[in-house]
Image (cartoon, grey):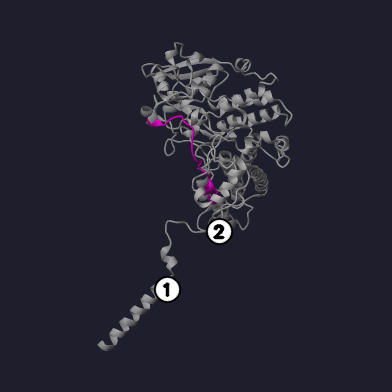
Amino acid sequence: MKSLKSPLIIVLTAMILTAGCSKSFENYSQNANQPLPGKVPPGIVLKTILNDLIVFPGGDADKQCQFICSNYTYYGTNEYWTGSATLNYGDLNNVLAMESEARRAAGSDNNPYHALGLFLRAFFFVNMSEKVGDLPMTDALQGLNNPAPKYDTQESIFKQSLIWLDSANTLLAGQIANGFLEFSGDFYYKERLSNPVNANKGRDALIQWQKVVNSYKLRVLIELSKKTSDGALNVAQQFANIYNNPSQYPIFTSNDDDLEYVYNSSFNYYPDNITNLGNNQLRLNLAQTLETTLGQLHDLRCMVLGEPARGLGFSDTSYNSYVGAPSGEDLSTMAAQIQEGKLSLYNRNHFYSGLTGEPTYILSYPEVCFDIAEAINRGWISGSAATWYRTGVTAQFAFYSIVDGNNTVTLQGPAGNEITYTVNFSFDDYFNQDAVKLKGDANDLAKILTQKYLAYARNSGYQAYYQWRRTGVPTFSAGAGTGNGGVIPRRWQYPTNERIVNLTNLNAALQSQYGGNDDINQDVWLVK
């Protein structure tokens, strides 16, 4: 028996080893933490993409839109960029992955994820192109199949983005009317923590997104204001089509529609909050282009956003006490003025009393109102620019809880204690000021653009900078403090990795746009 037992053991062992080796190498090389195609719900991917729509306040955009200033080198300077842009091709690859998973589940592209994917394509391509100019679009996002894609012109990118937005609107309209498949991952509307828009199994959230799509298209068309003679774009007519057909192209109609990032005290803190009060309070202050403008307009927002500069000798509720620093000023000069109490710091109660600050706009109802007022002023559509202008301003007042009448203003006292004042603010008095009132003359456009800039304060990414670049309103401060020889750049350079993997096509794009130089002081096609 012993002689038979050993061979049996050997055979069984060989069978086990053979069975164990039947698995392919790929079975062992798979990363258990890496999702596989068909196993990632598109809602999870959507949530990741949506998180990249926001530009958080307190960073470079806040400074380069001239809303805030650093007066202490350790916390950064107020200089503009000298190098390359950060682009969103990673987000766009995620859009393709999301759509692929949704298509796999739904059996077609007639699903909410594809509709939002079209919007997201437009959003990210416009965002990237605004920074640098021409970009790979048609041949992009093919990975190793085409690692060196040709560049599309900025005109082509904007034209295609407008087409994507139209297609997104059409898809969403059909899904809202006829029903749709599973839709999740939307933390801006459907799944937000406060007052989620989740009625009718998500249909109401899609109604909000359709408004986003068309309101965003108004933004894109306004940014094309220098290209109204371009027949391929037909800017004014496209704007009029949306404005004159609200049932086909619904847009924002109140602050409730805003696409905004809302902070909470559990997970996502507003960047300026009670935990960094001790470090930031004296080292960050408001900029002249924002705060001094508000003070000069006798605008109560200056007291909501800033503290009085008591070193100037005025009362706490005098508008003369609200003064920002010129962004072009040397940091040492700015720091000295802070110590002398001659510049407005952030309002402690508004920004530092808790963890949630204020929501950050990605796209807002006030902006839509100012877009329409600007379009009327430019003769694209018929209507009352003054009415839309006033509606936009008062909507922004409401964002800060400013009312027509008595308002409570909380300021930091000289001893660090809080002081509360009652300040009367009359909307009629405000709008009747010469510097604010629209009079039907050549100054109206600048007034509309000034209020639009003020509504962008500490939100909407680089939109305030793009407006300045397009129109020159408001006047930006430039000097030693802003770097680049006292000249504010007009664009970003292309990412350095393009010189490694796509040099031939990059050089062709640079030659056609900027005479062969990746020059931050030259204009992109959009504003020529």
- Mark 1 residue type: Ser
Question: Is tag 1's residue or tag 2's residue first in the polypeptide sequence?
Answer: 1
Q: Quadrant of residue 122?
A: top right
Residue 401 place in picture, x, y as percent: 53, 24
Q: Residue furthest left?
A: 2
Looking at the image, which is closer to me, 28 or 113? 28
Height in image: 251 above or below 94? above
Residue 145 is labelled as 2
> Which mark lies nearer to you, 1 or 2?
2
Residue 270 coordinates in the image, percent (x, y): 45, 33
Location of the C terminus (image quadrant): top right
Q: Which residues are magenta?
A: 74-95
**Visible residue check, residue 477:** yes
How many marks the image carries: the answer is 2
Answer left or right for 222 relative to 43: right
Is residue 80 one of those drawn in magenta? yes
Query: Is 336 contained in the magenta span?
Result: no
Q: Amino acid at mark 2?
A: Asn
Regarding residue 219, the answer to whether it shows in the image is no
Which residue is label 1 attached to?
A: 22
